[in-house]
């Protein structure tokens, strides 16, 4: 990541304090996005445990079917965590090289479709067990 001088350093050199604020804001926004993807991945792994172990115990359902669904959520969580790291690195490189920020619609589409499929299967399985 390109080194962005601290406010005191800029003021000491007589630099405009707002001049470097855009790269700084972009970097911080990218960091927040990384953390959001990471939290979502960890949440998916938590959901995997709930779906795979807790729900079958609570509703006296087939453990095998819910375990497979739980594995699906765990795979989604792992994918999100890996994607977060890869995406953060791509953004960091783009900022360092002063290139446009990358857009990865394939990853967004994959995540959306995967989440919709898992949610739909979960709802169907829960309704079937009621």
Image (cartoon, rainbow, N blue to C red):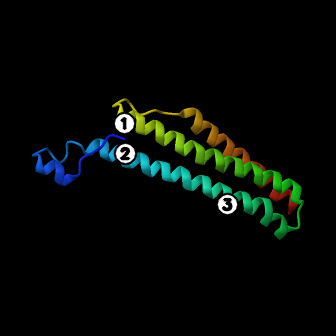
Name the residue that disc number 2 marks: 27
Mark with earlier residue (3, 1): 3
Looking at this view, is 115 or 80 the one in front? 80
Q: Which residue shows up at 35% across the image and 31% down it?
A: 97
Residue 95's disc number: 1
Mark with earlier residue (2, 1): 2
Rendered location of residue 3, percent (x, y) = 30, 43
Label 1: few (<14), some or many (≥20) within 10 Å? Answer: some
Secondary structure under the numbered disc 1 in the rendered image: helix
Residue extending furthest toward the bottom: 58
- Circle 2/circle 1 CB separation < 8 Å: yes
Q: Which residue shows up at 17% across the image and 50% down it?
A: 9
Rendered location of residue 27, percent (x, y) = 37, 45
Name the residue that disc number 3 marks: 46
Label 3: few (<14), some or many (≥20) within 10 Å? Answer: some
Looking at this view, is 91 or 111 the one in front? 91
- Is residue 87 visible in the rendered image? The answer is yes
Looking at this view, is 34 or 109 the one in front? 34
Q: CA separation, marks 2 and 3? A: 29 Å
Q: CA separation, marks 3 and 1? A: 33 Å
Q: Quadrant of the N terminus?
A: top left
From the viewer's perspective, tell me whether residue 21 is left or right of residue 50.
left
From the viewer's perspective, tell me whether residue 45 is left or right of residue 18.
right
Q: Which residue shows up at 88% across the image and 67% down it?
A: 60
Q: CA separation, marks 2 and 1? A: 8 Å
């Amino acid at each position: 990541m390109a080194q962005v001088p601290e406010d005191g350093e800029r003021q000491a050199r007589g630099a405009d304090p707002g001049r470097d604020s855009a790269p700084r804001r972009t970097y911080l926004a990218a960091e927040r996005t990384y953390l959001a993807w990471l939290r979502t991945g960890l949440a998916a792994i938590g959901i995997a445990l709930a779906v795979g172990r807790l729900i079958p115990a609570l509703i006296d359902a087939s453990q095998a079917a819910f375990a497979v669904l739980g594995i699906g959520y765990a795979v989604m969580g792992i994918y999100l965590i890996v994607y977060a790291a890869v995406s953060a690195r791509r953004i960091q490189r783009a900022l360092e090289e002063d290139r446009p920020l990358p857009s990865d619609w394939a990853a967004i589409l994959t995540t959306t479709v995967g989440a919709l499929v898992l949610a739909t299967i979960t709802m169907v399985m829960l309704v079937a067990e009621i």
